[in-house]
Structures are given as C-alpha cells and as structure tokens.
Image (cartoon, grey):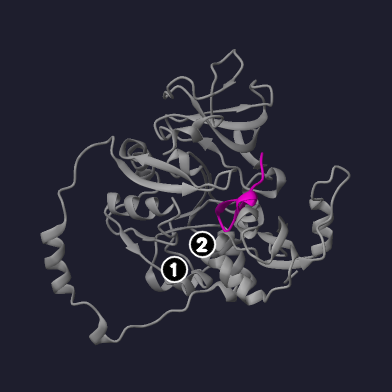
Amino acid sequence: MLPERHRPTVLELDEDERADPDLLEGALEDTLPPVPADLDREAYILFTSGSTGQPKGVPILHRHLSPYLEHNIPRYEIAPGSRLTQSFGLTFDAHAFDLFATWGGGGTLVVPMAADLYTPVDFTVERKLTHWFSVPSVVREAHRLGNLPLGRCVTLKHSMFGAEPMTAEHAALWREVAPYSQIHNVYGPTELAICCANHRLTGPSSDWPEFSGGTVPIGTMYPGMEGVLLDEDGLPADEGELCVRGPQRFDGYLDPRENTGRFLSYEEGGRATVYDGAAPLTDRHWYRTGDRVRREGGLMVHCGRLDQQVKIRGHRVEIGEVEAVLRRHPAVVDVAVIALPTAEGETELAAAYAGRETDAMRFDAWLREQVPLHMVPARITRLDGLPLNDNGKTDRNALARILGTPEGS
C-alpha cells in the first residue's frame, strides 16, 4: 500500500461548484460519436516500462479482449445481481476486467475510495460484494493494520488476485475472511490481454496441496491460449521462460522496433529462434513473457523474472528506467536502485546516490513529478560513493548491505 507521504490530498467541492448532471447528460448526447463494431480497432492502449527507459505502447484490440471476456464472465458467474469492485486504476490493465466483465455480465460496479482498500472486509460487507479483485498486497496491508476480521465476507462468491505473487499464507488467510468464496490466482502480462492463466482454490485451506516456494500456482492456460516453457537453448523444459500465443496475444508494440527480441518462432520438436524483426510478425509467433515458470503436477508455478524488472504494488518496474530518471536530478552524480523485501513480504525500491546533499522532501517531490508513484523509491540515501565490484561495476549486493533492513522490519 502507499506510504503516508505518497497519499494524495483530496479536495471536496461545495455543492454550488459541482456540475449540473442534467446539463452534462444533454451535452454528452449531443457530442458522443456512434460506436463502431470493428474487432480490429483498439480497445485500449497501455504503456509498460522498457529496458531502454522508454515506455512501450501495448495496443489491445477488441478481438484480443473479446475471448478474454467470453471466458471469464461465465467462469466467474457474473450476472445481474453481481456486485464487483473496481480497485485498479485506469493505467493498470486489470481495470479492463473491472469495467468490461462487470458490464458485459450485467453486474454492478462498486468503486471504492483509496481509504476503503485499507479496510477491505468492512467495504465488502457494507456494499454486499459478490466479487473481489485486487493485488494480494491489499490483503497483506489490511492484515498488518489489524483490519482483516475473519468470517465476515459471506457474500463473496469469487475472489481474484493478480499482478504479483500470492503467498499460500495469505490465500489461507483470505479463506478465513471469505469462507464461501472461490479464490483465484490469475496471471498474465499486459501484452496478453490482462490474464491468460488461472489457478482456483476451493474448500478449506487444510485440503490444499503444499505449494512450491510458498506461493499459489498460476495454474493452467485459458482455453485457446498456448504456453510453452523454453530453456536458455530454446528447447522445451520443465522450467524456463514462459512463452505464449493465442487469440489474446497482442499484435505487437506501438513502435514495431520494440518487437525485436520479444517474440520467437517455435514448433514442437524444434528449437526456438528469436524474432529479429526482418519478417512480418504473425499469430504463429510466441510472445516472450520474461517470466521464469516451473511446471509441477500439471500446474505452472511462477519463479520470478528473468531480467531486472520487479513488481511494485502489482506494477512492472524496470530498475534501469528509475535510475535513468534519477540521474537527471542536478544533485546526482551517480545512482543505483535496488529492490528489497519488506517485513510484510512485499518488495520496495531503495535508491542510493553520490552527489550533492539535497533536501529529501524536495528530492522526493521532484521525482514524483517525473515518474508514476509506484516507481518512486521508498528510500533515497546519499553516499559519498557507490560501492564497486572487481569489474568496476556497481556492487548491488554490497549496496543492499549498506542500505540495511527496510524501514518497518
């Protein structure tokens, strides 16, 4: 959850300052264009961080989103009378489930205020929710604050968690919170139209199998979606990079140059070859998720990222991009950012820089104007110089020891 210093200030408008809803309705009727029925048009475009520090545009077309909705609306039994949350912002691809799955099934969308996510049980009970969808850190933070009373969420039928690993411990805790709910751990990069795999937990937690690594599996692929695990040699393996193709896979980045290296060709019995951009991209190409996955008992288990991308409150963050922005500050000579575990089992960014001493609050305010909130390090520390290894590169292990245990541990 957001640290206190990152929470927004809310300004309430007086009644006479608010727009007349009758005037707004008339204006919208006069200005809204007709809705085209074209599956090859963009449903939305989102931007993810790239290794070069430049955002990558991900166009999701209606024909990518449609099979996702066709599968998930009946899977989660969304129908008139269903009451679903909208806990994700509009820059987070999961919001498309909140909006379109709810309306597609004829349900009601119930939008929480930011403070409601600190008390999810009270919000669920008061609003009689039937479905909950959030990042698992909502559960962890509410539990840490003592805001997770057990056994009260009896109206919940389905609870979905995604965008970051869900521990078996917190899944079991949510089972006590919502005793009649199915619990779903969902997985999928933005490039695969929200989610492409799911693992469902039912019944008492005492009946669940033990999960490898202490996290809930990401399960199995959606119908029509294909997934293969490939090792470093491009051969199928029980553990490797998860590569995916199917009707939910996007057609390529907004800038076609970004497609190079992010796709590959592979057919059973052969060896994968990385897409070099020379030929047209087709639906036979596999998208490389960059996630290391292991197959256990027919289920997929997420084992982490293959690169420096980390998940902060459910958002993918490229450490190099944060460093690139920090280097633009006039007080900074050199900088390094690392990801550290917190006492609550989450991940936070910590930054160290060499350069001129500067006011911490001003530095923080400057950075918040440059990058999204989830990319702002929880701590920024000035050092006389960054530690180096024998190759003259920043020694990130030594830096982690210098920065020490995260606050709150």
Which residue is painted at 44% across and 24% down in the image?
281
Q: Residue furthest top?
A: 269
Report the residue at 38% width, 41% height from top. Answer: 60
> Which quarter of the picture shows residue 341?
bottom right
Q: Residue at x 53, y 62 (%)?
A: 370
Image quadrant containing the C terminus: bottom right
- Does 310 lie within the magenta span? yes
Viewer-nearest residue: 287 or 77: 287
Q: Amino acid at mark 1?
A: Thr
Please state which of residues 219 and 36 is positioned toward the viewer in this rendering: 36
Does residue 68 appear left or right of residue 244 in this picture?
A: left
Q: Position of residue 47 (x, y in %)?
A: 46, 48
Q: Which residue matches tag 2?
A: 178
Query: Is residue 341 part of the magenta span, yes or no?
Result: no
Label 1's element?
helix
Q: State which region is magenta.
A: 306-321
Q: CA distance from mark 2 to mark 1?
A: 10 Å
- The residue type indicated by label 2 comes to Ala
Q: Earlier in the sequence, mark 2 or mark 1?
A: 1
Which quarter of the figure has residue 336? bottom right
Label of residue 124 in the image: 1
Residue 149 in view (yes/no) = no
Q: Is residue 254 left or right of residue 37?
A: right
Mark 1 and mark 2 in contact (Cβ < 8 Å)? yes
